[in-house]
Image (cartoon, helix red, strand yellow):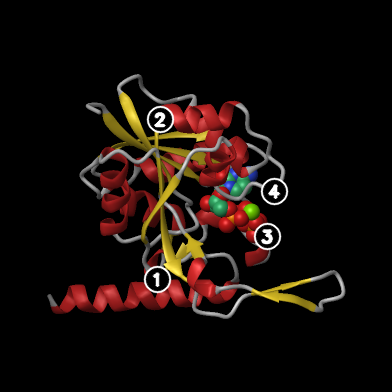
Amino acid sequence: MSGRTAALIPAAGRGERLGPGAPKALRDIGGIPMLVHAVKAISSCPAVSIVIVAAPSDNVDEVTALLGQQEFPSDVHVVAGGDTRVESVARALINLPDDIDVVLVHDAARPLVPEEVVASVVSAVRAGHDAVVPALPMTDTVKRVDTNDDVTATLDRSTLRAIQTPQGFRREILQRAHAIADDEGITDDAGMVEALGITVHVVPGHEEALKVTRPFDVVVAEAILAKRRSLGALG
Ligand code: CTP
Ligand code: MG
């Protein structure tokens, strides 16, 4: 594999679980929009050459202006996202230059992913895995329940993982998955690749790659940022 790596950042969600306000990617973490953190985190990885952001369709100009004000280590482009995450990723995917052979998909909602996670996903794809996801072991006990909220099973936690992004793919594999995608119940790109019968490989994720979903997650993300800023001030 001799091409370049692109990162697609779906950022077109409304952030309904975060409560009323601007689209989630435009809300601040420590005074800086979540999307700016996410683009910085991904583009700081030297392996990433180009970033394509899928913005909320009503905010494309605003997002273009916002990202245009910043200096990022890679080229950054903005396209209009769609009504579902799958559609937003698909709209970014059709804008890829020809020489890209590895594609990352990273949620804008994971603004603080450490560079080492991004690098290890890219390396694992370049080492020969078709599809790679970062993952953490489960810490809670996980049970299955029925519609009456009665427990029907306790799952073997040692075989379970919580999956994060960026997820990395050989370009052709991700395009094949999107070509036959059925949006129903899809929350990540690796799930679509699994549906093709292709093996998805897991590498270590990181607690700081948490997904900002509810207001409590903003508190945690701001604490992580405050810790990094104080360590940076010390160093
Ligand atoms: N996303 C997207 N286009 C959509 C829906 C979601 O690009 N139509 C993106 C979000 O912007 C986010 C990622 O997919 O970066 C993961 O989605 P999620 O955390 O569910 O974000 P939201 O959809 O914004 O949040 P909510 O479901 O609470 O509305
Ligand atoms: Mg959502």
Which residue is disc 2 drawn over? Answer: 171
Q: Nearer the viewer, residue 76 or 62?
A: 76
Q: Residues within 10 Å of mark 2 (few under 14, many from 20)?
A: some
Q: Residues within 10 Å of mark 3 (few under 14, many from 20)?
A: few
Label disc, if present, on residue 16 of the rendered structure: 3
Which of disc 3 and disc 2 is earlier in sequence?
A: 3
Which residue is disc 4 drawn over? Answer: 185
Quadrant where the N terminus sits is top left
Q: Residues within 10 Å of mark 4 (few under 14, many from 20)?
A: few
Residue 70 vs residue 201: left or right? Answer: left
Q: Is label 1 in a helix, a strand or a loop? A: helix
Name the kind of residue labelled 1 in the image. Glu
Name the kind of residue labelled 2 in the image. Arg
Which residue is disc 1 drawn over? Answer: 207
* Relative to 179, residue 168 above or below: below
Question: Is there a contact, CB below 8 Å, between mark 3 and mark 4?
Answer: no
- Residue 19 location (% of width, % of height): 67, 66
Q: Is label 3 in a helix, a strand or a loop? A: helix
Q: Nearer the viewer, residue 174 or 39?
A: 174
Which of disc 2 and disc 1 is earlier in sequence?
A: 2
- Residue 77 location (% of width, % of height): 40, 33
